[in-house]
Each structure stands twice: as structure tokens, then as C-alpha cells.
Image (cartoon, rainbow, N blue to C red):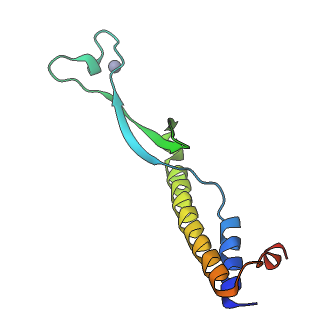
């Protein structure tokens, strides 16, 4: 098997082993609860509630948010990193596919299904 094909198999294995992922980024949010007399509504020295952590992401042009509990923060950040790795590997895979077709021609599919 050519070096390029071996490289493709390696990237596919890495993609397969990636596990869960999340898109987007996490930001800290502070809010006012609107309860009369609450510290967050103080006219002179308001002390807002928070922070809570919000994941913001966009898939197929649609923006969404999701609250991440403090206890889940480390895991969420790991999954976001996984998505970064996923995008990186996809770029490498696509680059290798193009190089394969350019270098060895079309009809290179058989080795992928082995
Ligand atoms: Zn409040």
C-alpha cells in the first residue's frame, strides 16, 4: 500500500477514535433576576447573578446556546477541543484524498473498504 493510502487509513482511524464533540465556545454570563429588592437590582451598586456558563454554537447556519453546569465545564471544554481536532483531521484527510487522486488517479476506492 502506498504511503498516501497508509496516511489516509491512519487519519480515518484517528477520526474513528475521536469520541464525542461539541461545536462553539463557552462564555460567562451574568444576569439580573428582576426580583424586587434583590442585590442584582440595586440602583447604586448592583451585583448581578452568575457567572453561568453558556455554550454558543452554529450548525448549518442556525445559532443555538446551551447552559453548561459548572461540574461539566472541563468535559465540555474537552469536547470542544475534540471538534477542533475533528476539523483538523478532516482537512488532512481531504488533502490526502486530493493528493491520492492527483498522484495515483481515480478508482482508488477499493482499499478504503478493506
Ligand atoms: Zn437578582
Residue 67, relative to residue 4: is it above or below?
above
Q: Is residue 80 above or below residue 49?
A: below
Residue at figure coordinates x 34%, y 31% from the top left: 30
Residue 50, given in percent of the width and then of the height, sits at 36, 32
Give the quadrant of the N terminus.
Answer: bottom right
Residue 29 higher or lower than 43, as above or below:
below
Q: Is residue 74 left or right of residue 48?
A: right
Q: In terms of depth relative to the viewer, which is nearer, 99 or 57? A: 99
Q: Residue at x 51, y 41 (%)?
A: 61
Tally of marks: 0
Quarter of the image where one finds residue 34: top left
Q: Residue furthest left?
A: 44
Ligand 1 image position (quadrant): top left
Position of the C terminus by quadrant: bottom right
Relative side of 59 to 29, left or right: right
Q: Is residue 113 above or below residue 104?
A: above
The outermost residue toward the right is 114
Nearer-the-camera pick, 29 or 111: 111
* Place of residue 8 in the rendered image (x, y in percent of width and height, measured from the top left): 68, 78
The extreme bottom residue here reads: 2
Residue 82 screen position, x and y as percent: 56, 60
Compare residues 67 and 94 and report the one nearer the observer.
94
Q: Residue at x 83, y 77 (%)?
A: 110
Tell me where residue 51 appears, x and y as whole percent. 37, 36
Amino acid at each position: 500500500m502506498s504511503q498516501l493510502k497508509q496516511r489516509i487509513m491512519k487519519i480515518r482511524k484517528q477520526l474513528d477514535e475521536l469520541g464525542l464533540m461539541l461545536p462553539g465556545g463557552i462564555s460567562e454570563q451574568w444576569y439580573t433576576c428582576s426580583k424586587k429588592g434583590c442585590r442584582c437590582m440595586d440602583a447604586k451598586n448592583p451585583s448581578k447573578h452568575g457567572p453561568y456558563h453558556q455554550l454558543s454554537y452554529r450548525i448549518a447556519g442556525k445559532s443555538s446556546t446551551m447552559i453548561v453546569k459548572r461540574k461539566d465545564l472541563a468535559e465540555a471544554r474537552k469536547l470542544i477541543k475534540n471538534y477542533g481536532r475533528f476539523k483538523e483531521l478532516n482537512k488532512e484527510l481531504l488533502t490526502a484524498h486530493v493528493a491520492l487522486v492527483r498522484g495515483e488517479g481515480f478508482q482508488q476506492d477499493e482499499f478504503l473498504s478493506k
